[in-house]
Image (cartoon, grey):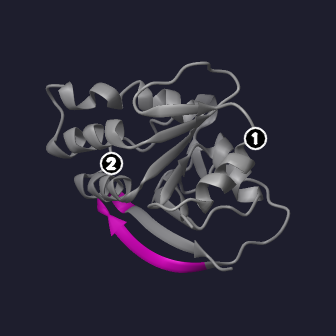
Amino acid sequence: MRKLIYGMNVTLDGHVAAPGDDIGWGGPPSDELFQWWLDQERASGLSLYGRKLWETMSSYWPTGDQRPSASPAEIAFARNWRDTPKVVFSSTIDKVDWNTRLVTGDAVAEITRLKAEDGGPMGIGGATLAGVAMRAGLIDEYALATYPVLVGGGTPFFTALDSWVNLNLVETRTFPGGVVLTRYETRR
């Protein structure tokens, strides 16, 4: 059975985007944090995206390695992003590209099916899609890179749940700029 990991950059008050879908609150990550995310992406066998995150990622990373200012880590991330199989869950877009397939139906059923397959861990991104998986009890691990900024509203990392989810702390690490990474596994 595959492991499902939900990880994103988050504000101290728990948002992945400020009002208006603004994600500029964190600025560029430190080289060390960027490398940590790259290592996570390289370990992933499949990436699951909601529409908004897909549109953000696919607008930059397909050619991110061709930008004159791209760092070696950005070049590696772009190449890995293109090569990693991806699934986008959306009922409002009709075409995806870059080693990706589109699912327009029941996200819980498809994620459950994918988890039952053999293979490496899967990453899930996008707060709305992750919220659906969270409420269904499908997420095995949470990774939060918490930035020292308060935005007062926007898109929350966590969704409202019907019951408690107990977690075990797996890792805590501090990065430049006061960013604190925490990883938790779901206690089953």
Decide if residue 10 is in sight here: no
How crowded pointer 1 is (Cα within 10 Å; few <14, some 14-19, many 20+) is rated as few
Pinpoint residue 132: horizontal percent, then vertical percent: 73, 49
Q: How many marks?
A: 2
Pinpoint residue 9: horizontal percent, then vertical percent: 47, 51
Left or right of 95? Residue 132 is: right
> Looking at this view, is 46 or 13 the one in front?
46
Magenta segment: does it hold 139? no
Badge nearest the viewer, 1 or 2:
1
Q: Main secondary structure of the magenta part?
A: strand
**Which residue is identified by label 1?**
106
Under mark 1, the amino acid is Asp
| Rendering quarter of residue 19 | top right
Q: Residue furthest right?
A: 162
When the figure is inspected, residue 103 is found, relative to residue 108, above or below; the finding is: above
Q: Which residues are magenta?
A: 168-178
The residue positioned 53% from the left and 35% from the top of the image is 53
Magenta segment: does it hold 169? yes
Pinpoint residue 182: horizontal percent, then vertical percent: 47, 69
Q: Rounded to the nearest whole Å, what is the CA distance between mark 1 and mark 2?
A: 34 Å
Pinpoint residue 12: horizontal percent, then vertical percent: 55, 57
Decide if residue 35 is in sight here: yes
When the figure is inspected, residue 92 is found, relative to residue 165, above or below; the finding is: above
Residue 4 - label: none
Name the quarter where the C terminus is drawn: bottom right
| Rendering quarter of residue 62 | top left
When the figure is inspected, residue 27 is found, relative to residue 101, above or below; the finding is: below
The residue positioned 51% from the left and 27% from the top of the image is 55
**Which residue is identified by label 2?**
29
